[in-house]
Image: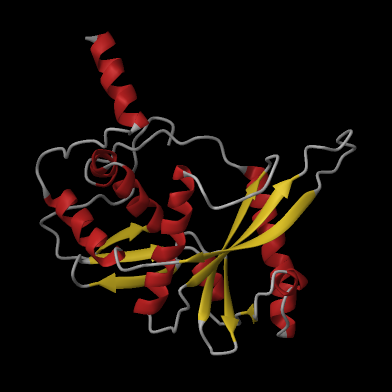
């Protein structure tokens, strides 16, 4: 909300009910425990930015396109181009897994969190192993890669999904895939259309850190004082400078 507050349920350390926590909120904790505490314990959220409606449109169209091949039980031609030996996975819960309010869920006893995350897609290989798939959109010159500090969050994202599917009893491949679409800015003009190049980038995921991170997030919320902020947190830096100036 614009005023930086939330009306949704906040963490209560005295409650015996499992606390629902999303993949994006876990990413917030990993980036800055103080921002996470302010959001989930005190209800003071980061100010939301504008919606990325073009990215949402691309995601929507990619899902429709891959769903067409899913209904046929066939690989998408892009999968064949990049040598991915799998097909889109058919499952009755797919729409729930894609729903931002539901997602793939698991009640973790160690942290007492109901942890969930909404996926873009799941593929399955000949051995019956699932591949977590995430769609990404960009518009850059040069080659798209998974290198770069800010793309580490993308890797953590799919690793959390891998962990969730494993906890739900699915056989999961360590290889996740990013379907990357890159808007072409080299054209002479717009002419009412934007053209994209498409590629599939593999990531060898390691979800061994997720369980411990969930427990650390729980301990963070249970404390009665604000945790320290991450030294690189832009939100905390802004609040600190603003407070100094206002004071």
Q: Is residue 211 above or below residue 31?
A: below
- Which residue is the extreme one toward the bottom? 127
**In-front residue for pair 34/126:** 126
Residue 110 located left or right of residue 145: left
Please give the name of the residue rendered at 44% of the width and 51% of the height, measured from the top-left corner: 152
Q: In which quarter of the image is residue 107?
A: bottom left
Q: Is residue 177 above or below residue 45?
A: below
Q: In this view, does 164 lie above or below 171?
A: above
Residue 42 located left or right of residue 82: left
Q: How many marks?
A: 0
x%, y% of residue 85?
Answer: 65, 80
* Quarter of the image that includes the N terminus: top left
Q: Coloured how?
A: secondary structure
**In-front residue for pair 182/103:** 182
Please give the name of the residue rendered at 85% of the width and 43% of the height, measured from the top-left corner: 193
Q: Quadrant of residue 217?
A: bottom left
Residue 167 located left or right of residue 180: left
x%, y% of residue 231?
Answer: 27, 33
Q: In which quarter of the image is residue 43?
A: top left
Q: In this view, does 139 lie above or below 107?
A: above
x%, y% of residue 192?
Answer: 87, 39
Please give the name of the residue rendered at 21% of the width and 9% of the height, measured from the top-left corner: 247
x%, y% of residue 167?
Answer: 34, 78
**In-front residue for pair 96/239:** 239
**In-front residue for pair 39/162:** 162
Please give the name of the residue rendered at 44% of the width and 44% of the height, measured from the top-left corner: 149
């Amino acid at each position: 909300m614009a005023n930086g507050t939330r009306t949704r349920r906040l963490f209560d350390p005295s409650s015996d009910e499992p606390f629902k926590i999303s993949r994006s909120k876990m990413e917030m904790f990993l980036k800055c425990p103080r921002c996470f505490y302010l959001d989930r314990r005190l209800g003071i959220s980061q100010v939301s930015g504008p919606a990325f409606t073009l990215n949402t449109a691309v995601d929507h169209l990619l899902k429709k396109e891959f769903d067409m091949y899913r209904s046929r039980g066939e690989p998408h031609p892009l999968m064949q181009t990049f040598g991915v030996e799998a097909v889109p996975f058919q499952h009755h819960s797919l729409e729930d897994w894609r729903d931002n309010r539901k997602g793939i869920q698991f009640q973790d006893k160690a942290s007492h969190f109901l942890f969930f995350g909404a996926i873009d897609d799941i593929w399955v290989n000949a051995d019956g192993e699932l591949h977590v798939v995430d769609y990404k959109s960009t518009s850059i010159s040069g080659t798209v890669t998974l290198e770069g500090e800010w793309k580490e969050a993308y890797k953590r994202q799919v690793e959390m999904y891998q962990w969730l599917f494993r906890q739900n009893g699915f056989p999961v491949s360590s290889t996740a895939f990013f379907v990357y679409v890159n808007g072409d800015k080299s054209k002479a003009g717009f002419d009412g259309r934007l053209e994209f190049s498409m590629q599939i980038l593999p990531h060898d995921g390691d979800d061994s850190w997720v369980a411990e991170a969930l427990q650390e997030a729980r301990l963070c919320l249970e404390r009665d004082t604000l945790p320290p902020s991450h030294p690189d947190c832009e939100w905390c830096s802004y609040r600190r400078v603003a407070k100094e100036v206002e004071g």
